[in-house]
Image: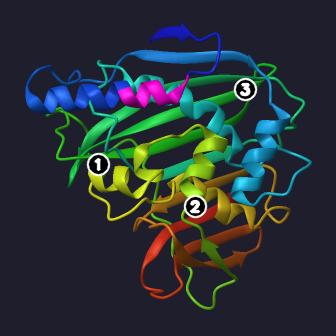
Amino acid sequence: MRVTELNGPPSLGPLYARAAAGAALATSGIAGGGGHELPARELVRCGVPVERDHLADYALACGFGIGGALPLTYPHVLAFPLQVVLMADRSFPLPLPGLVHLANRITAHRAITPAETLDLRVHADRFVAHPKGAQVDLVAQVSAGGETVWEGRSTYLSRGADAPADAVSPDEGTGTDIAEPPTPTGTGAATWKVAGDTGRRYAAASGDVNPIHLHPLTARAMGFPRAIAHGMWTAARAVAALQGRIPDAATYDVVFRKPLLLPSTVELVTERSGTDWGLAVRSAKKPEKVHLAGRVTSAG
């Protein structure tokens, strides 16, 4: 695998704009699409410090308390820009605009302090068929002092796309699928009014400026009636409610179901079993409408 080291954080706005332009040209037939297989490429950033202001902005946007170890989901926003570099490249087989985040797995091997300097590595994995198109995983690894301290796997769907004919399907595959967590039911543990500007506030804190999250007009251009919350904001907001009650070494699996339209009122439902937690985020008006199902388990 070819390794490319980046000297600084990528700027995501131009990457999204370039990807959108490329997708429009490909749709019109003026330019070709991406390749037919995943690029054998790993992107690396070394010696990345945790910027205290950025961490504070993220914690505020997602409901985490400030102080102590990094939030479980925070390393995702450090690695995500490198993933976008991969997905925005013309060699990537699926178009970045319109990719749907299906599921996410995070494993923290120990607590990470804000004083640590981190090394980030990302690559793409498992370009396979999906009943509605094709899916791909973006894999991230975070190390400190040569020790792997955090890992993440994000699964994305491209509707209507084709996977290689010899690709292993998710049902048969390698055991790396993110299993559907059980959905807790019962009385909500908390009710949140999710404001209409939540997508813009999370984008400012995370760098994820995908247009479907920013404004009703840009969301409608991608087929949504209005802007939708980032899946990773929903995942972060849910696990923030458990801060201080989950182990430092933990695996957090989430599956994203119905888009969370902005603004909305939602409920968090939790269910505890020893040190493990099940959780769900559902509509407060229609409890059968589940936006996220997740599970936190000990990784120790």
* Quadrant in the picture for residue 137: top left
User: Viewer-nearest of labels 1 and 2?
Assistant: 2
Badge number at residue 234: 2
Q: Position of residue 28 (x, y in %)?
A: 10, 30
Circle count: 3
> Is 129 placed left or right of 264 in the picture?
left
Q: Position of residue 272 (x, y in %)?
A: 71, 77
Report the magenta residues as a range: 11-17
Q: Amino acid at mark 3?
A: Ser
Badge number at residue 116: none
The reply to whether dot 1 and dot 2 touch (C-beta < 8 Å) is: no
- For image coordinates 49% across by 66% down, the residue present is 262
Distance from disc 3 to disc 1, alpha carbons, whole Å, reads 31 Å
> Is 248 placed left or right of 259 in the picture?
right
Tell me the quarter of the image containing the N terminus.
Answer: top left
Badge number at residue 143: 3
Q: Is residue 110 above or below residue 38?
A: below
Q: Residues within 10 Å of mark 3 (few under 14, many from 20)?
A: some
> Is 116 placed left or right of 291 in the picture?
right
Q: Residues within 10 Å of mark 2 (few under 14, many from 20)?
A: many
Q: Secondary structure at mark 1?
A: loop
- Is residue 16 located in the magenta-colored stretch of the structure? yes
Q: Decide which of tag 1 and tag 2 comes sooner along the chain.
A: 1
Q: Amino acid at mark 2?
A: Thr
